[in-house]
Amino acid sequence: MSKNFDVVVIGAGPGGYIAAIRAAQLGLSVACIDAWTNAQGGPAPGGTCTNVGCIPSKALLQSTENYEHASLHFKDHGIQIKGLELDVGRMLARKDGVVKQNNDGILYLFKKNKVSFFHGRGGFGAKVEGGYEVKVAGNSEEVLVGKHVIVATGSSPRALPGAPFDEKLILSNDGALAIDEVPNRLGVIGAGVIGLEMGSVWRRCGAEVTILEALPAFLGAVDETIAKEAHKVFTKQGLKIHLGVKIGAVKADKKGVSIDWTDDQGAAQTLAVDKLIVSIGRVPNTGGLNAEAAGLALDERGNVKVDEACRTNLPNIWAIGDVVRGPMLAHKAEEEGVAVAERIAGQHGHVNFNTIPWVIYTSPEIAWVGQTEQQLKQSGRSYKAGSFPFMANGRARALGDTTGMVKFLADAKTDEILGVHIVGPMASELISEAVVAMEFKASAEDIARICHAHPSLSEATKEAALAVDKRTLNL
C-alpha cells in the first residue's frame, strides 16, 4: 500500500531538509527520504554537509585553531601553558558530538513541522495516478507517491583515476575528518576549499603538509589580490603548495603513499607521505535514482538537467543543490530548496546567484561575493577599487590577528557594489554585510556613510568602501 504526499523529497542534506520544512510550513503534506546512517545504524540526516563536510570540518578547524593559539599565541596575551598536549581522540569525539547534535536537530525539526521521515534510499518507480512513485529501500521499505518530487541527492567526492579511496591511506573528505593519529607527512591533491581546510587542520596538529595543485594560479576563482595574500600567509604558516603540477602514478602500500608528479618546470618528482587526501572536486549523486527508467534527463556531467526555476524535463519533478548546475554550496542548496517549495505552493521563490557568498574557513578566513577584479577586466566593465588592511584596524590589533584586508569593487559611473573580497579574521561573518548591500543594489558610498561600531572588524569594511573614493580615515 503506497503512502500519498503533496511533496516527496529525496535527500535530507541542506537543500532537501530545508525544502521539506518550507513545504510543510506552507501547508503541504511532505515526506523526506534519506539514507545516511550513523555508527549505531540510526538515521543521520543532514547529508555530506552535516556528516562529512561543513559541520565536522568546522569543528576540527576550531579545535586545531584553539590548539595553535594555545601553543603559539597565548604567551603574547600573558597566558603561560605548561605541558600542553593534543588529544586527537577527544578532538574527534567532540567533532562527532557536534555532528550528532545537528543530526538530531534535523529530526526534531521534521517532527515539529510534521514532515514524515523515511530512512533509506529513494528511487523513482512508475508514474501513477496522482503523481510519481518513489520507492524507499533500506531501513524503511516503503512505496510513496508524490504529486511533486524534489531530487536533492547531493554529491560525492571525485576519486583520482587508478587510485580509489580506501579511507585509510587514500582519503576523501570523509577519511580526512577521521584520521586518528597525526601523520608525520600528509599529502593533499587539490588546493581548493577542502584541500586547504583539511591541510590546515593537520598542519596545526604537527603534520608536514604538501599540497599539489594542477592549476597554475592559486585559488583561481578568488580575486587575485586576496589569493596572493592568502598564498603568502599559508606558505609562511608551513603549508608547502606546488602549483601547475601534473599527477602521475599514485601507489599505496604498508609504508604509506607515493605520488609521482611533474612540477611546473617539467621536472619529475616523487612525494612520499603517510596519508593522502584527494580533493579534486565532486560528482553529482544520481546513481540509485532510477533516473533513466523514469525518463529524468541528465547532462554530460551527470547533473540533473533543470531550468532557472529548478524544474526538470518531467512535470512536477524538481532538482536542487549539488545534483544540479551551479556552485556546490550548502547555502545555495538551501535557497533553492526554499524557492522550489514556494513555487510548488504557488508563490514566487527566488534565488540570486550573483549574491551567493563563498567562504574558505582557514585562518585567515577567505570570503567573497560578486565579481573579482579579473572578471571585471575580462568583461571590460569600468570599475573602481578600494581596500583597507586589518593591520590598521583597532579591533584586529586587540585580537592579535591583523592579517589580510577588505577589498571593494564598484561601478566607475554608478558606484554600485560589484564585488567584495575579504581575507582576514571573521571574514565569514563580515561578508554578510556585503551580501545585503548587493541585494539592495547599494553603492560603495552607502556603506561608507553607515555608522559602524567601534572598535569592530566591520570598520575595515567601511574603510574599504571609503577607499573606493580614496578617502579612508584611518590609513
Image (cartoon, grey):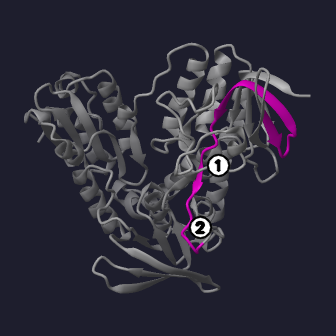
Which percent across, then down, holds residue 312? Answer: 58, 33
- Quadrant in the rendering for residue 227: bottom left
- Quadrant in the rendering for residue 180: bottom right
Q: Could one spot residue 69 in this view of the protein?
A: yes
Which percent across, then down, holds residue 269? Answer: 39, 85
Residue situated in front as seen by the camera: 109 or 320 = 320
Quick check: 206 left or right of 179?
left
Number of disc labels: 2
Give me the C-alpha separation between circle 1 and circle 2: 15 Å
Name the residue carrying label 2.
171
Name the residue carrying label 1.
51
Which percent across, then down, holds residue 190? Answer: 44, 64
Disc 1 packing (10 Å; few <14; some 14–19; many ≥20) = many
Which percent across, then down, holds residue 41? Answer: 82, 50
Q: Secondary structure at mark 1?
A: helix
Residue situated in front as seen by the camera: 196 or 327 = 327
The vertical placement of 437 against 47, above or below, is above
Q: Which residues are magenta?
A: 134-163
Residue situated in front as seen by the camera: 295 or 395 = 295
The structure residue drawn at horizontal position 16% and vertical position 37%, both measured from the top left corner, is: 381
Farthest residue to the left: give it: 470
The structure residue drawn at horizontal position 26% and vertical position 49%, both measured from the top left corner, is: 223
Quick check: 354 left or right of 278?
left
Does 150 lie within the magenta span?
yes
